Image (spheres, coloured by chain):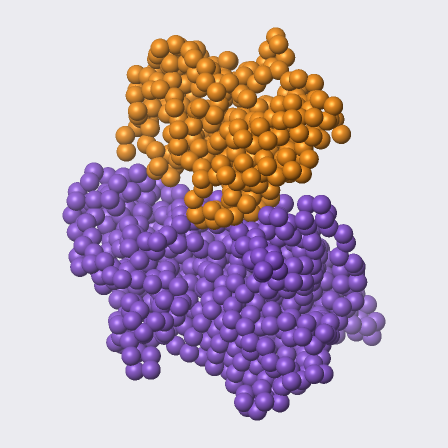
Chain colours: A purple, B orange
Amino acid sequence: MNLVTNNKWIGQRTIRPDGMDKVTGRAQFAADTTMPGMIWGKVLRSPHPHARIRGIDTSKAEKLAGVKAVVTSRDIVDFTIEKGAVMLGIQDMRWMCRNVMARDKALFPGHPVAAVAATTEAIAAEACKLIEVDYEVLPWSIEIEDAILPDAPILHEFNRWEGKPSNIMSRIEHKKGDLTEGFASADIVIERTFTTRPVHQGYIEPHACLISVAPDGKTTIWSSSQGQFMVRAMTSMLTGIPQSDIRAIPAEIGGGFGGKTIVYLEPLATMLAKKSGRPVKMVMTREEVMRATGPTSGSRSTVKIGVKKDGTITAAHGTFYLQAGAFPGSPIRGAAGCSFTPYDIPNLLSEGFDVCSNRSKVAAYRAPGAPIGAYAVECVMDEVAGALKMDPLDFRLKNAAKQGTKAAHGPTFPRIGYIETVEAAKSSPHYAAPLGEADKTSGKVRGRGVASGFWFNAGGESSAQVNITEDGNVVVTTGHPDIGGSRAGIANICAELLGIDYRRVSVIIGDTQTIGFSNLTGGSRVLFASSMVVTQSAEKVIQTLRERAAKIWNIDPEAVKWEQGAAHPVSPNAGQFEPLTLKELAEKAPAMGGPIGAGVQLNTQGADGGFGTHICDVEIDTELGIARVIRYTAVQDVGRAIHPGYVEGQLQGGVAQGIGWALNEEYIYTREGKVDNPGFLDYRMPVCSDLPMLDCIMVEVPNPKHPQGVKGVGEVPLVPVMAAVANAIHNALGLRFYSLPMSPPKVSAALDAGVRQAAE
Amino acid sequence: MADIRYLAPRTLDEAIGAFAAAGSAARILAGGTDLLVQVRSGIVKPGVIVDIKKISEMTEIAETADGGFRIGAAASGMALAEHPRFGKVWPGVLEAVNLIGSKQVQGRASAGGNLCNGSPAGDSVPAMIAAGAIVTVQGPDGRREMKVEEVPAGPGRTNLKPGEILVSFVLPPRAPGSGDAYLRMIPRTEMDIAVVGLGVSLTLENGVCTAARVGLGAVAPTALLVEAAGAALIGSKLDDAALEKAAEACRSACRPIDDKRGTIAYRVKTAGVLLKRTAAIAAQRATGK
């Protein structure tokens, strides 16, 4: 590792390259793009939670003046169930093809059944109403407990579980030691069951795209996603157009949080454009986003933990049932794999069950599955610490995973920073501060809770190109949509390596035909992976610069060093030459060997997992049941904060989402099985005034396998939050809530029940 | 897909003529913060939109000769907030009007629109009811006055006759020692819709309540005047027993539903809590403390 501590740009809060455009409204999001001759696409969606599609008659819609094309599942490539899985990343194209357009069955209200392109949005919407769909309405289930009943309506008839048709699609387990023996040796065993509701990623920008298909089949896609290469590959597979003919151009993204790692509109707009010969634009409404794009799973988890009187955990068992929605693929890996990982537990069984039901297919949401599992585990951890009369942070320290601990999901940990996060939490000003007096006249009480969390973090494929411009500045191109400030981080690193002002480095995101393959923005992988390829590219550029200077000075390249943006002789012995700056070498480039630039493509390895420990103070209005977070500190091992401002931004963003998940956010369904709150008025994400300043403590335990020590930071901060809030509420009220959200009616009812019980 | 005709008359007579002529296809546009949302989401498809903001009487805020206020139905929340005197006399009404939507929405949204939208949860309505506001409406048959609580007829409906337009609110002059307040319960801290909203206006003389009105929102098909709650406060020194009696009156007045915004039990309980809290603020304002 080549960790320079004395950095000029790494660790600085520089101005982000995309900042000016965003605050002045110039940034181009997907819905901002237009083309001459453009027409509008709209989707007809199933009104039913579960229905067999006996037939679709589009003839009336096709005859409506202004309608240019209609598509149904006949226009989308079918990946048949029988032929087996066709995987693209973690997505099985058998489910993707059915999710973008229902084939034999509609599986949730909002499931696309047809799409229309017309000269105006209004005509397209009118045409959708003229499409006649012959539905055979079927019984349905949404909640896990209903979907796993023996007589539950079956979504996928081919599926068998224990020999019978079932909505349980798969199971995963992580195992270590002997559970029976472990619990037998425990002095205290606590087992609890928890439920969480589906929650949406809540990105502000709805899905949108504009797609043009030229007569020769050359296709251009402008869309907002977490991966232009994912858009290209999925669109190619679902339309049959070769990838080499599809140019996917990434728009600026107005939030994704995992929800934009799959496609919804692009294959439909491509086929509409191909059929009509016109560029087709599609923009979802918020209601469509809420009804038909992935929230994350609702869940039902049971967690059992056994400890000795001295606080040593002897065994733990977790069972996590997650709603997948209409198609298999809930994040059971995150729930089962991450939840116990902060602890060194000798006997452990962690199981995940993937359950289909009649609601929209889940999509990734920030550390998919991990917050759901951590909520259950960290609440039981708190209860166990209470039973032991131990400080909850001391209890965690006693059982903390460290270098050499074998995690149940596989790895034996290298140097990790979990203990450091707990110690930093313990010694934080927040943990030392008293809770402060609440206004008792209005029945307010306060409490404090803590919780920890882990997320895997990912590496994977990335490509970069670093070019020196003729005037001696730098253009860096990478292949990842920037959803968290990654361009700012890359500018800092590149400026550091080249020894120049960061403002001389322009960082852009290439489209699929101008930069090499780069995997999704997801798994907290982008800065980790892209800074690896950028570093190697910059090192190649520096090598070229040294060779050019050596040639000019007529000395050996090994006798030239690169410092502070210029080539210097390594020592006076090498020769007495004035330094040659980047600008001077760029000017001389045409005569000295041509353009200067380098690109590197890698499948990056060595991503280390991330740990966080959070402290939450709440104040509860006991008359109205309203819980408010009044102080919050997120401690996280961030590896190396390349741009501390955006690392803090990630921590604060994750915490804000977790507070919403804990207190108010939930999908509410009508008796007819439709989402009853498909908008931000009644789907209550927190607003700024709901939150205190969210404090961050960045612990830096550098990743030894990364040139700058980077670890992913974007997902960990959501993992501990719901448990931290729940534990704080318990501390305030002496009541434990085993289901989310802890909304005012629920808290109020629990308090009333408590009062009644005391009176009886 | 039919086009929408947009009219922006300069006089009330023109507006009423156009509105009445268009019949049920017409909608009045004040701030538009409800109407445009409803049009965009396809809930309403008006053939004619009559914008009343160009009519001066509709946006005027004036003190009446007797010390009351006349507020044009289309006066925006922000205009009301910027009025030098209104918020000093009717702080509760102002805080209720200013709770509608966000800062940006406040630049357009009006108390008149909030009332005519007919939502049981409109924030300004319980405060206006507590204030004893009288509204002037005008239609093809001329002008008439109504008590503000008589305007809502049910969710999304009013008792205005076909062709009638809400023109203004009149708030009565204030006796010395008067104060008003409005509180709502929302799960968030802003940008939300009332689960329960409650307005209190009262007058204190030597510590004794001599007049009190209570308006209650979001717990029945329309916002309600809770006369029994006002009666429970009148004659008392706002002692615990009187406040509990008024709270009980509010709880009894509730005819709520279980829905995505709250349970019946929660709404009923909250109505009582808000009565006590709102009365305390109104009393504090009445005594100038």
Question: Which residue sits at x=59%, y=23%?
Answer: B80
Asked if residue A270 can be seen in this view, the reply is: no
Residue toward you, A57 or A557:
A57
Residue toward you, A687 or A752:
A752
Residue A67: quarter of image = top left
Residue toward you, B27 or A637:
B27
| Residue B115 drawn at (x, y percent) | 47, 27
- Farthest-out residue, right: A572
| Residue B83 drawn at (x, y percent) | 64, 20
- Farthest-out residue, top: B65
Examine the rendered structure and indicate whether residue A734 appears above or below residue A124.
Answer: below
| Residue B209 drawn at (x, y percent) | 66, 26
- Farthest-out residue, front: A760
A612 relative position to A270: left or right: right
| Residue A239 drawn at (x, y percent) | 29, 61
Quadrant into which the N terminus of chain B falls: top left
